[in-house]
Amino acid sequence: MANLRFPLRPGLFAAVFATALLLCPQPKQAQPKHAPVAHGTDTIGLYDPVTSTFYLKNSNSAGPADLTFVYGPAGSGWIPIAGDWDGDGVDTIGLYDEAHTTFYLRNSNSAGVADLTFVYGTIDRPNRQVVTGDWNGDGIDTIGLNFDGSFFFLRNSNSAGPADITFDAYSECCLDIAGDWDGDRVATVGRYDRFAGEIRLKFTNADGHANLVYRYGPTNTDWKAVTGDWNGDGIDTAGLFDPSRNLFFLRNSNTAGVADLTFQYGPVGSGWIPIAGNWDGQ
């Protein structure tokens, strides 16, 4: 399939976003304790749930998709995810069928069948959110679930079985995120509160409140969060996606402030879902 080209809307939104981000950091500002280890640069992508098509970019900029392919059944309502499932340094896509608590992970960014298929979680637990990350530092990303908004159940292998890590994050209002916030090559969870315009990060996957809380983005929106190492410094940071304008706002530090990268990608108002990963291993 030929790459789609999307119209670029020049930087009309920088002033608007800068005004929206005149926000103050919160008092809890715990600092990373480890020297970060660089592992490449993450870039964004979009998933069209109607056609089950992925549009992945190898740069954080407007322009055509570098990788375009169909994966999974069209119109299924399955949730797109991404991670390095085999430890080769390249992030690839996956899908989560919430109705049957089944994961379908693929080890290449291409059309085809799943390389890993397994059931994780129980159907009778409502309001599930998915997170992915390297929870034990072995170089392989694995899956996790959040039930009922507060309790996380993380697994250290992409297979059926019980959770290896279980904890209460003491927060039920938010959209779940995960990343290596302190550069120690171990992923931990976080939350994006789109109503308060607030990012809340934990440095350990254990019971307790966030270690780092800061304001980023406007309040009371339907914006989505993406996370990744946007500048290759070994630390994952947050980004936001405005679905009404298909604008990404990526920041290179986990602090309040304006976006370091702002660009439009994808058709406006399409309902496509943002994802992020290191698609080319660079």
Image (spheres, rainbow, N blue to C red):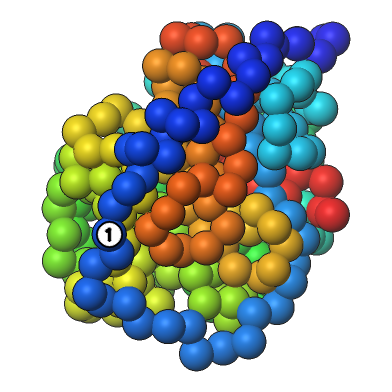
Residue name at image x 29 percent, y 64 percent = 25
Residue 1 on image: x %, y %:
82, 10
**Residue ID at (76%, 39%):** 59
Q: Is residue 185 toward the left or the right of residue 211 in the image?
A: right
Q: Is residue 212 left or right of residue 49?
A: left
Which residue is farthest bottom? 33
Q: Is residue 128 visible?
A: no
- Provide the secondary structure element on which disc 1 rests: loop
The vertical placement of 27 against 32, above or below, is: above
User: Foreground: 247 or 274?
Assistant: 247
Tell me which amino acid carries mark 1.
Answer: Cys
Q: Position of residue 149 (x, y in %)?
A: 19, 51
Is residue 21 shown above or below 6? Answer: below
Q: Residue at x 25, y 76 (%)?
A: 28
Residue 207 visible in the picture: yes
Question: Could you say which is closer to the camera, residue 264 or residue 208?
Answer: 264
Quadrant location of the C terminus in the rendered image: bottom right
Q: Position of residue 132 (x, y in %)?
A: 50, 55
- Sort mark 1 into few (<14), some (14-19) or many (20+) by Cα contacts within 10 Å: few
Residue at screen point 69% across, 68% down: 233
Location of residue 60 by image quarter: top right
Residue labelled with disc 1: 24
Q: Position of residue 44 (x, y in %)?
A: 63, 38
- Which quarter of the figure has residue 62? top right
